[in-house]
C-alpha cells in the first residue's frame, strides 16, 4: 500500500527536505502540491508528480489523500492543520506548530476529536548523534546532568529561503516569531527530549541586532536571543540562537556529574564524551541536516511508520505545544525583564 500525500507549501523546506524524503519512501505517493504561488506548485509537480493547487482548501478536499504535510508560513500552520484534520487527513506540521498557544491547543484538540494523527517536524531529535547521546545519558554512566548549553546560529534564513532577502521569515505579520520560532524551538524540543524533563522557568534577552530586509530596513522580528532555563529536576542551561553567525553552529553540550557530552561541536566527531582531560570517547555517527548541507532528516519516514503501524507519532502535538510554551515564556521574560514560570 502507498499512502497518498499532499504537501501545502512549495518553498525551500518542501523542496530541500519534505518532497525528496517523500519520494525516497517506498510507501508514499505524492498526490498533490499546493502553494499560493501556483507556478511554484506546478514546478514541483513537474518533478515529483501529483496535481498542483493554489488554494490549500482544494488540496485537502481530495478524498484520496491519506495525509498532508503543512510547511507554509508560520501563521497559517494552525488554520491549515485544523482544516486538514477535519477533512480526515493525518498531518505532519512544520515547526513552530503555531504562533499562539491557543492555536496550538486547538490543533491538538482537533486531532483528538477527529481521530487523526498530528506530528510536529522537530527533526533535531532524530539526528544520529542526538539519538546516541540520549542513549548515553539514559545509561547513567555520566551521572545526572547538571547544566547544558545549546547553540543554533547561521548567517540567516534569507540565504536559504526561496524569496531571498524578501523572505517571509522577516515579516512579523506572516512569520509571527523570529529566530526563536525558527531555531530556538528546535533546541528547546531537543533538550527537553534528551533530558526527559520539562522546563519550568525562563529568563531571556532578545533583539534585532543586525538583520535588514532587501530594502535596507530593520526586520520586524528578533534575529538573536539568549535564553536561560531551569527544568523541574533542577537542571539549568542556556539556549542561544542567531541569524547573524557567519558560520553555522548547531552544537549542544551537557555537563554531567561524571563527564561532558558534546554533540555536533567538533568538525570530525559528531559526538564526544569527555570523562576527564585524558579519557574520552569519539564517535562518528552521522551528520545533522543544515542549511549548508541537507542530509536525510528521517522526519517523513517516522511519520509514515506511524501511519503504517497505526500508532501515535513519536513527536506529538503535545511536544510541539511544550516547545512553543517555552518560547512564549521567553518572549514574556524579555518584555517583563523578569524570570517567568512555565506551565
Image (cartoon, grey):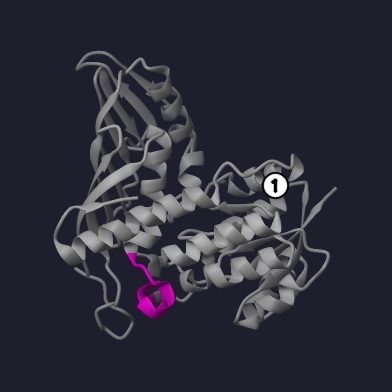
Q: Is residue 261 magenta?
A: no
Q: Residue at x 66, y 58 (%)?
A: 113
Quadrant position of residue 49 = bottom right
The front one of 269 and 7 is 7
Name the side, left or right, on which 243 lies relative to 315: left
Q: Outermost residue toward the bottom? A: 215
The front one of 122 and 243 is 122
Q: Residues within 10 Å of mark 1 (few under 14, many from 20)?
A: many
Asked if residue 287 is positioned above or below residue 316 in the image, the reply reads above
Q: Residue at x 60, y 66 (%)?
A: 81
Residue 248 locus on image (x, y percent): 33, 52
In this rendering, does residue 93 appear at all?
A: no
Q: Is residue 166 magenta?
A: yes
Q: Residue at x 66, y 74 (%)?
A: 34
Asked if residue 144 is positioned above or below residue 68 in the image, the reply reads above
Predominant secondary structure, magenta span: helix
Q: Which residues are magenta?
A: 165-178
Q: Outermost residue toward the right? A: 1
Asked if residue 40 is positioned above or below residue 316 in the image, the reply reads below
Asked if residue 183 is positioned above or below residue 129 in the image, the reply reads below
Q: Secondary structure at mark 1?
A: helix
Quadrant position of residue 140 = top left
The front one of 247 and 31 is 31
Q: Outermost residue toward the left? A: 337
Name the side, left or right, on which 38 lies relative to 221: right
In this rendering, does residue 255 appear at all?
A: yes
Q: Number of callouts in the render? A: 1
Residue 95 locus on image (x, y percent): 48, 58
Q: Which residue position holds label 1?
A: 304
Residue 38 locus on image (x, y percent): 65, 82
Quadrant position of residue 177 = bottom left
Amino acid at each position: 500500500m502507498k499512502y497518498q500525500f499532499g504537501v501545502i507549501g512549495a518553498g525551500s523546506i518542501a523542496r530541500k527536505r519534505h518532497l525528496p524524503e517523500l519520494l525516497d519512501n517506498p510507501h508514499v505517493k505524492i498526490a498533490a502540491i499546493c502553494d499560493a504561488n501556483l507556478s511554484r506548485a506546478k514546478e514541483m509537480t513537474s518533478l515529483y508528480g501529483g496535481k498542483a493547487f493554489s488554494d490549500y482548501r482544494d488540496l485537502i478536499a481530495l478524498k484520496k489523500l491519506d495525509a498532508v504535510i503543512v510547511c507554509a508560513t508560520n501563521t497559517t500552520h494552525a488554520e491549515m492543520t485544523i482544516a486538514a484534520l477535519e477533512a480526515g487527513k493525518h498531518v505532519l506540521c512544520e515547526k513552530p506548530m503555531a504562533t499562539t498557544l491557543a492555536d496550538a491547543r486547538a490543533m491538538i484538540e482537533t486531532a483528538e476529536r477527529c481521530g487523526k494523527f498530528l506530528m510536529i517536524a522537530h527533526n533535531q531529535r532524530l539526528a544520529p548523534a542526538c539519538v546516541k547521546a540520549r542513549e548515553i545519558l539514559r545509561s547513567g554512566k555520566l551521572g545526572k546532568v547538571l547544566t547544558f548549553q545549546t547553540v543554533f546560529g547561521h548567517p540567516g534564513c534569507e540565504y536559504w529561503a526561496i524569496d531571498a532577502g524578501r523572505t517571509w521569515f522577516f515579516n512579523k505579520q506572516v512569520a509571527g516569531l523570529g529566530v526563536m520560532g525558527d531555531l530556538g524551538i528546535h533546541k528547546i524540543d531537543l533538550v527537553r527530549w534528551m533530558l526527559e524533563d520539562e522546563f519550568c522557568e525562563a529568563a531571556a534577552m532578545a533583539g534585532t541586532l543586525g538583520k535588514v530586509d532587501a530594502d535596507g530596513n530593520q526586520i520586524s522580528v528578533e534575529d538573536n536571543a539568549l535564553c536561560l532555563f531551569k527544568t523541574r529536576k533542577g537542571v539549568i542551561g542556556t539556549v542561544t540562537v542567531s541569524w547573524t553567525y557567519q558560520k553555522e553552529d548547531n552544537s549542544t553540550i551537557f555537563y554531567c556529574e561524571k563527564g561532558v557530552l558534546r554533540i555536533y561541536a567538533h568538525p570530525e566527531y559528531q559526538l564526544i564524551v569527555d570523562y576527564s582531560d585524558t579519557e574520552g570517547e569519539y564517535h562518528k555517527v552521522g551528520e545533522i541536516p543544515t542549511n549548508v548541507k541537507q542530509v536525510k532528516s528521517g522526519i517523513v519516514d517516522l511519520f509514515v511508520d506511524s501511519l503504517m503501524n497505526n500508532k501515535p507519532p513519536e513527536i506529538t502535538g503535545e511536544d510541539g505545544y511544550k516547545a512553543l510554551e517555552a518560547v512564549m515564556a521567553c518572549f514574556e521574560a524579555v518584555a517583563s525583564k523578569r524570570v517567568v514560570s512555565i506551565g
